[in-house]
């Protein structure tokens, strides 16, 4: 029951998945040769979902924007490491996850006493954040996902918002598929509890 509720809630008002452009390996190779049009094509194909993932992981628009820029700069600098044995989006997502993890560590070192205030501030998002979600249910879901600890939040976002498989998530997070399954199960249960009050509304829409 928790799994079905999470699936339905996570899809409420949020665009899922990434459309992979054809011959992305060739486009990436062209980027390495300084082809600005090739870079623009890759950037346009992936920027929205890269930013969305960064926003869910960091819960800060300015930081998410910075992480997005860093991810694409890294793409240019280290694109030769992409071997084409996975989707480019999977490779990009791993960059974002690693960048956001590094950012969290930097923040903990520089502001060790600020953690308690961060979560409270997140509960009062700006109108820009409200426009990101469609409707009150989607906004409630978004906030519930954001309230999860990072190690549970990342697989939930990758599974239900980006539609990645367990294998792809394990590649992004650098862990086993068993660990992915365990973290998703824990995320399901927490979200189901947090969002139980929405169940009647959702069932009424069927």
Image: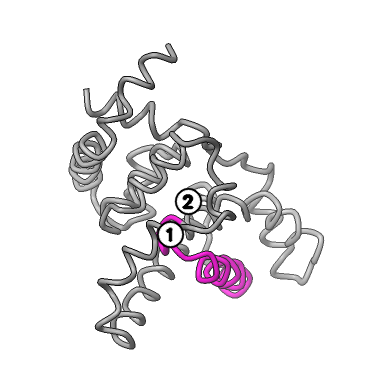
**Which residues are drawn in magenta?**
56-80
Residue 92 image point, x, y percent: 51, 58
Discs 1, 2 touching: Cβ within 8 Å: yes
Lateral position of residue 155 relative to residue 73, left or right: left
Lateral position of residue 108 relative to residue 46, left or right: left
Camera-nearest residue between 45 and 116: 116
Q: Residue at x 48, y 58 (%)?
A: 55
Residue 132 image point, x, y percent: 57, 47
- Residue 94: give its label: 1
Please tell me in which quadrant of the rendered image residue 168 appears.
Answer: top left
Q: CA distance from mark 1 to mark 2?
A: 6 Å
Residue 74 image point, x, y percent: 56, 72
- Residue 90: give its label: 2
Camera-nearest residue between 97 and 203: 203
Q: Residue at x 53, y 60 (%)?
A: 82
Q: Residue at x 38, y 65 (%)?
A: 121
Check residue 94 for magenta coloring: no
Q: Residue at x 53, y 38 (%)?
A: 17
């Amino acid at each position: 029951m928790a799994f079905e509720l999470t699936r339905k809630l996570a899809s409420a008002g949020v665009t899922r998945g990434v459309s992979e452009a054809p011959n992305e390996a060739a486009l990436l190779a062209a980027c390495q040769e300084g082809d600005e049009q090739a870079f623009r094509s890759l950037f346009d194909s992936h920027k929205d979902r890269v930013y969305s993932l960064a926003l869910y992981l960091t819960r800060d628009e300015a930081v998410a924007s910075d992480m997005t820029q860093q991810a694409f700069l890294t793409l240019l600098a280290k694109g030769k490491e992409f071997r084409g044995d996975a989707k480019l989006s999977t490779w990009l997502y791993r960059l974002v996850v690693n960048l956001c993890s590094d950012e969290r560590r930097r923040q903990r070192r520089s502001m060790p006493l600020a953690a308690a205030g961060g979560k409270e501030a997140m509960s009062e998002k700006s109108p820009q954040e409200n426009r990101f979600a469609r409707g009150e249910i989607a906004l409630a879901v978004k906030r519930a996902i954001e309230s999860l600890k990072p190690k549970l939040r990342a697989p939930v976002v990758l599974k239900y918002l980006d539609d990645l498989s367990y294998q792809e998530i394990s590649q992004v997070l650098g862990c086993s598929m068993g660990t992915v399954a365990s973290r998703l199960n824990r995320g399901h249960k927490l979200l189901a509890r947090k969002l139980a009050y929405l169940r009647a509304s959702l069932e009424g829409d069927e």
